[in-house]
Amino acid sequence: RANLVNSKNVKLLKEAGCNLVTMGLEAGNDYLRNTILKRNMTKDHIINAIELIKKEGIKVQTFNLIGIPKGSIENDFETLELNIKCKVDYAMCFIIQPYHRTELYNIAKEEGLLNQHFEGFDTMENPYGYHPPVVRDPKQKLMIENLHRLFAFLAWLALPSSLVKMLIKLPFAKVYLLVYNFWFNLYRYFIFPPTKFHRCMLLVKNKFLSFI
C-alpha cells in the first residue's frame, strides 16, 4: 500500500535485494479509488511512494482498474495519466469484474451494469477474459477494451491524451491485442527478470508447456 511506504522501508527492501515493487494504484480518480474501491489513499500517497521507491533504483509495477461502476472513460484516462506522471515501469491494467456478494457487485447491479445472466464467476466459461459481465453500450465497450489492451504501452509511451482518445475509438482490436501481448512479454522476459539465466529458463519453460 502506497500510504505505508517510507524511506526506511524502501532502503530495507533495497538492502534485501528487491528489484521490483508491485503496487495497487487502482484508479486515478479520488472518488473511485477511495469511495467505491475503499482504498483510502490519496494521489500524494501514491506519487510520493513511487518516487521513494524509484529513487532507490527499484522498478515499479502498478495494478490498475478501468470500467469501474459510477466512473467514466474520462476517469480511466485519469488513471492512465497518473501512471504516466509517476513514470511507472509497467502499468498492469484490468477491466473491473464485480465479484458476487460484494458491495461493488451491488453498486453495479443498482447502476444496471450487470449482465442479467451473470450468477457468479463459477458459472462463466472464461471468467478472466476480455469480456467481463458488465453491460456497456457498444461504443463505450470498444473504448474500454481498447484502452485495456493499450494501457501498459501507452503509460510507457506517454502520448498526449487527445491522441489516446482517438486511438481507443478505432476498430483495431486485433492489432491492439498484438501490442498488448508484445509489450507484456517484453516486460515479462526481458525487463524485470533479474538474470539472463532466469530469463532463458522462463522462456524455455513456457515454450515447452505450449507443446504439451
Image (cartoon, grey):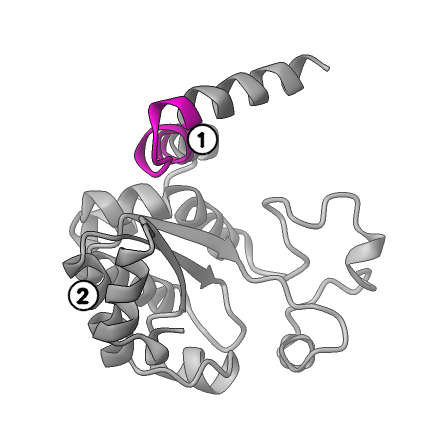
Q: Does residue 176 sit above or below 122 in this rendering?
A: above
SS assignment for the magenta stretch, majority: helix
- 54 displayed left or right of 61: left
Residue found 33% across the figure and 64% down from its top? 79
For the question of whether residue 181 can be seen, the reply is yes
Disc ID at residue 101: none
Span highlighted in magenta in the image: 182-198
Between disc 1 and disc 2, the foreground one is: 2
State yes or no: residue 186 in magenta: yes
Tell me the element at label 1. Answer: helix
Task: Depth check: give the residue in front, 51 or 195.
Answer: 195
* Place of residue 159 in the rendered image (x, y in percent of width and height, measured from the top left): 18, 47
* Place of residue 3 in the rendered image (x, y in percent of width and height, measured from the top left): 34, 80
Residue found 53% across the figure and 56% down from its top? 95
Q: Mark 2: few, some, or many residues within 10 Å (few <14, many ≥20)?
A: some
Tell me the element at label 2. Answer: helix
Residue found 63% across the figure and 44% down from its top? 129
Residue pointed to by mark 2: 51
Task: Depth check: give the residue in front, 189 or 167.
Answer: 189
* Place of residue 210 in the rendered image (x, y in percent of width and height, measured from the top left): 64, 18
Residue pointed to by mark 1: 181
